[in-house]
Image (cartoon, helix red, strand yellow):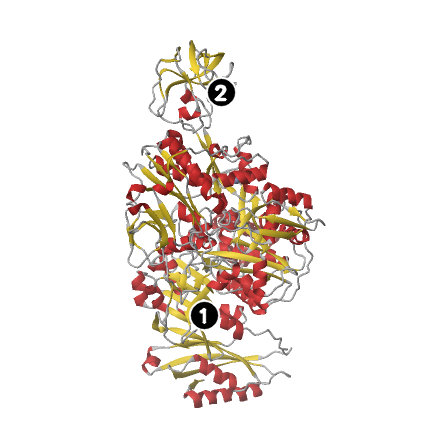
Amino acid sequence: MDWEQNLGELESQVTELLAQAVKAEDFLQIKQRFLGKQGEISNLLKGIREIPPELRPVFGQRVNQTKQLLEERIAEAARQAESGRVPGSGETLDLTLPGVWNQPGSIHPIAQVLDEIREILEDLGFQIAEGPEIETDYYNFEALNIPKGHPARDMQDSFYIEDEIVLRTQTSPVQIRVMEKRKPPLRIYAPGRVYRRDMDVSHTPMFHQVEGLWVDRGITFSDLKGVLMLFAEQLFGEGTPVRFRPSFFPFTEPSAEVDIECHMCRGKGCRVCGNSGWLEILGAGMVHPGLFRRVGYDPAEFTGFAFGLGVERIAMLKFGINDIRLFFENDLRFLKQF
Amino acid sequence: MKISLNILRKFLPDLSKSPGEIAEALTMGGLEVEAILPVREHPPGITGVVTAQVTLVEKHPGADRLSVCEVNDGQVIHRVVCGAPNVKAGMKYPFARIGAKLPAGVEIKKAKIRGIESSGMLLSKAELGISDDHSGIMELPDDTKIGIDFNELEKDIDIVLEVNVTPNRSDCLNHIGIARELSVLSGVNFVLPQIIVKEEGQDISESARVDLLAPEACPRYCGRVISGVKIGESPVWLKEDLIRIGQRSINNIVDATNYVLFLLGQPLHAFDLSRIKGREILIRDSRAGEKLVTIDHAERELPPGTLVIADRERPIALAGVMGGAETEVRGETQEVFLESAWFQPLAIRQSSKMMKLSSESSLRFARGVDPEGVALALDYAAMLILQIAGGKLARGKVDSYPGKKPCEKLSLDLSEVRRVLGDPVPIEEAARIFTSLGFQPEPSPDGSRIGVTVPSFRHDLREPVDLIEEIARVSGYGRIQPTWPGLRADRRSLSASEKKGVSLERKVRDLFSSQGFAQIITYSFISSEENQIFSSGPELRIANPLSDQMEIMRGSLLPGLINTVVHNLRRKFNDLRFFELGRTFQRGTGKGAEIQETNRVAGVIARVEPPEGWRGWLAGEFDLYHFKGILENVSSGLNVENLSFREKTSQGFEPGLSGGIVLDSQFEVGRFGRIAESVRKKYEILPVVFAFELDLDTLLSRGIRPKKFAAFPRHPGVEWDIAFFVNDSVPYDEIRNVILQSDSNLIKDSRLIDLYRGKEQLAAGKKSMAFRIYYLSPDHTLTDEEVRTVHRQVAENLRQKFSAMIRE
Ligand SMILES: [Zn+2]
C-alpha cells in the first residue's frame, strides 16, 4: 500500500540524513522536517481522510509507531554525535591544545634565590637592612679592619668614583652602618649588589651578596655553627653535611669558610667540587673586636657573628648553572627556564 | 701557591701521610688545598738505567768508605764499586749499566776505582736528576721487579699541592711555613735543614761596603760576597723543582735565589759585584730625576722617595721589587754580591703601586717576611750557590739590623676563649697547642691566663682574639659543638621602610611577571653615550672602569632594557616584555652634594608583529593605551591611587606619544610612552618599543595608602547614559571630573563607553563621547524623577563647561 511505502521511505530518508548530520542544528533541522508541525509525519496524518475508515486505526497506529521510532533515532544519533564534541559546535574536544592565555613572564633566578634566602633568614629572626651601593672608603674598608695598603685590598680590586668613594665590594659595610645607629641586641641581614673589578669566565664585575649579623651578649662560635648549619640545611635540604674550616676575613676572628657536601658526587669528589667532595657556600666568623670598638660597643660585653654569601654562587649550585655570565646576559632562552 | 711534597720532606723527614691526608690536614687548618697534582714524568735524558738487586756487599780492600757489590740486573751479575752508606744486600736500587746515559749528559763507562774494576753504577736521586738528595742511593720498594727500564717505573716522582694562602698568612707563602703548619696540624716532626757554609779568603769588608741610609724603610740588610762563580745551567733537580712549583729556570745563581725564596720565603737578589760602582751599596730614597732600567729592560722613572738600592753613582735596583739590568748576573759574571733584607711592607707596597710593578719578591715583602729569617736564608743561598756554581765565599757577612725588635708578647684570659668559642679549653690543651706553634706559652699560676711570645714570622697575631683563633684552628672547628641560641635578640623592626621596600619590590615583580614580563638584571654601569639617551645632568663616572662601555653609574634603567631587547630580537623572539628592579645613581648638584641612589622599576614592550596563537587570540593592535592599561593594572595592584598620566616629552621618548606619571598632581614619579624613533634607529630596532620607568622610593613614601573599607548600601543603584559632541581638545579626565562633581552625593562613578571621531566630527574639530553614570543614594532607592534631575544637571554642566552638544 502507498502509505506503508511512504512510511518506509521516511524511515530510510531519516537514516540517511542522520548519517550526515554533525552539529546540533542538523539534528534540529531533521527533527523539524519530519516530526515538526508542518513535518512529513504531520502531512502524512493529514491524508487520513483518504484512507478507508476500517483501515484508519491501523494507519494511525503505524504512523504513531514510526513517529516514535524516528524521535528515538534522532535523539539517539544526536546524543552519539555530541559525545566527545564541544556541545552544539560539532568540534571534537581536544584538551591537549594549549590554553588561551598571555605568554607567561618570569622572575630572575637571582631574585628567586634571594627570596628563598630571605625567607630562611626571616624565619630565623633576621631583619632586613640596606645600605648604599656607592660607599665611602671608610665603610667599605677602614671600618672593616682593612686600612690602606692592607693585603686584603688586593683580593678585592675595586671601582672608584673618586678618592675615598668606591662601589662597595661587599655588603659588609651595612654591618657598620647598622651598628653605628643601633645598640645591641641586633640580628640583621643585608642583601644587595656588589662590585669588583674582575671580568673573566668565572667573574662578573657585578654580583649579589647577602650579609648577616647577630650581636648580643653571649653569642659564641658554637652559635655561629648552629645557626649556619640550620641555614645551610634549609637552603640545600635537610641532612646536608656541613663543615666549617678556618679562613681569613679582616673583620672576623676567628673566621670560617662553610662548605656543604658536594651534591653531585655525595662527597666522593668530582669535577664540580674540584675533587674535594665539598662546595664552599659562605664565609663567616666572630665579629672582630676592632669593629665593636669603632662603633662604640664594648667588646668585653658583646660578641657576635657575621656571615656573607654570594647569591650567584648559590644559584649556580642550586640550578646547575655553569657560567656566571648567563645571569646578566638576560637571554630569554635562559630567563624562561626559571 | 704550589707546594712540592718532596721539598717539604726537607723539613719533615718523617712525613709518611698520603697526599690526601696532608691536603685534608692543611685545609682543615686554614690552608685550603685546592688541587693535588701528581708529578709523573721522569727527568729526560735517562737511558740504560734498570732496576737491580744487590746480592752481596763486601768492604773495598783499598778504601774504608767504599764497598764492592754484586748487582743482579736480571740478565747478569755485575761487580760494582759503591760509595753510598745505605747500600745493603737484598735491597733494590736503580742501576746504570755500562753505556747508560744520565740527565746531566754523563755517560757511564768502565772504571777502575782504587784498583777494583766497577762495571756500572748504583744511583742516587741526585744522579738521576730527581732531587738534590746526595745522601745515598735511591731505595726502591721490595716488590719492584728487577731488570725493568727505570723510565717505565710507574710511580709518582712528586706530588704538588696547590695551596690557597690567605693574605694574613704570608709566613706560608713558602715551603718552610707550610711544613711548620703541617707539623703542628698533624704532629709530624719538624727539623730545620743544616746550613754549613765554608768561608775562605779575604773578609767581605775588603770587597764591598754597605751603607744603610734608610733604616725606617729597611730595618735589616744582610749581604755576602762570592767570587769565582761559574754561571751556567742549573742541575736537573733544581730545574725540575722550579718547574714543579711553577717557576722558570734562568741560570744557576738566579735559580738558587729563587729556590730559597720558595723554600724559606725570603726574597734575595744577586748583583754582579764588578758592575757596582765603587763596590759601594747604598740603601736610600731615590732623588728627583733618577731612572732605572729594570731586568725586564724597561726604563723607569723613579718618583722621588722611592726606596732603592744604589751604588756610588746611581740606583741599581728597585728595593724589594725588581733588580736593575746593568748589575744583573750574566754569563761573564764572576763575583756576586748576594742581598737578603727586610723591607717595610708599606714601603714596598707603595713603590710597587707607584711603579705599577710587582713580583714574587714584592708580593712577599708587601705582606711581611720573617725579619729573623733574613740571615739564615742568605746563608742557605750561599751554600747552594757554592754547591752548584762553585766559587769562594768571602769571610763574614754584612748584617745591618737597626730595626731589631723584641718579639711581641700577648696574654690570653682563658675565660675569653669560652666567651668567644662557646667551648671551654683546658689550660693544658691551650699550652700544648701554643707549644706546637712555637709560642713559648707561660701559664699563670692560678691557671686563668696564659702568656705567649709570638714568633717573628707570625706578625698576623696582634691581640688575644687572634690566639683564640689559633686554638680553635689547631684543635679543629669540627670539635666545637653547634648550639642554637634562643631568640634573645629583640623583635623590634629595624627599619619599617626597608621592610616595606622589599615587599613593594616583591609585589611589583609579581604584578609585572603575571603580565608576561621577564625580570632581568643588568650591570649598574653603562657607557656615557647610552646614559645620555635617557638621562641628563652631571654623570657619575667610575675613575677606573673596565671599559668605556662600563664607565657611568646609570641614571636610568632603560639603556639596560633596550640592550636586552636588542639581544633577544637577534635571537628571533618576537614578543618581548622585560622589566628590571634596581637603583639609579645621580650626583646631587652643589658643593659637597651627596650621591643619590633611587630604587626604580622600568620595563619595555617590543612586538615584531601581532604574535600568532592557534586561535589568533593574541592578534590585534597594541598601542599606547594598552600599554597604559598595564601600568594602571600594576598601580591598582600596588594600591597606589592618585596616579595621573600627563602628556610630556621626556628624554629618549617620542614627542606626542609619551607622558609623565604624576602622583597626587605634584610629585613626578615616572615616565612612559614610545621610545623615540631616533633611539630605535640608533639601536637598529625595527618594532615599536614602549617603555616606562618609575621611582619606587617616592611611591613608597607617598603613594601607598592603607586600604579603608567603605560601607555600601544594600539597595540597588541605576545606570543612565549620556552622549554628546564636544571639542576634540577637551581631555577625558576633565569631562569625567565635571560629571562626577555634578552631584558627589548621588553619582558614584562614571565610565567612558564610547568614543568616536567620524570624518564629519573631525572636520569640525569635535568628537562624540558617551558616558555611563552610576547613580546610587546612600539611604534609599532612587526614583526616576530624582535621577532625571541630577542627569539634567550633568548635561547642563557639560554644556556650560565645554559647550557640549547633548545628543538625545
Ligand atoms: Zn663533587
Along the line of sight, which residue is nearer the eye, A200 or A53?
A200
Residue type indicated by callout 2: Pro
Q: Chain of mark 1?
A: B
Looking at the image, is A41 positioned above or below residue B125? below
Residue A56 position in % (x across, y down): 59, 54
Residue type indicated by callout 1: Gln
On whether disc 1 and disc 2 are found on a single subunit, the reply is yes
Along the line of sight, which residue is nearer the eye, B481 or A105?
B481
In this picture, residue B702 sits left or right of residue A225: left
- Quarter of the picture containing the C terminus of chain B is bottom left
- Is the C-beta of the residue carrying label 2 under 8 Å from the nearest atom of ligand 1? no
- Dot 1 falls on a residue whose secondary structure is strand
Q: Residue at x 46, y 63 (%)?
A: A137
Looking at the image, is B775 positioned above or below residue B407? below
Q: Earlier in the sequence, mark 1 or mark 2?
A: 2
Can residue B745 be seen in this snapshot?
A: yes
The answer to which image quadrant residue B542 occupies is bottom left
Can residue A62 be seen in this snapshot?
A: no
| Residue underneath mark 2 | B85
Q: Chain of mark 2?
A: B
Alpha-carbon neighbours of circle 2 within 10 Å: few (<14), some, or many (≥20)? few
Along the line of sight, which residue is nearer the eye, A211 or B603?
A211
Which residue reaches farthest right?
B446
The answer to which image quadrant residue B95 occupies is top left
Q: Nearer the viewer, mark 1 or mark 2?
A: 2
Return the mark for residue B596: 1
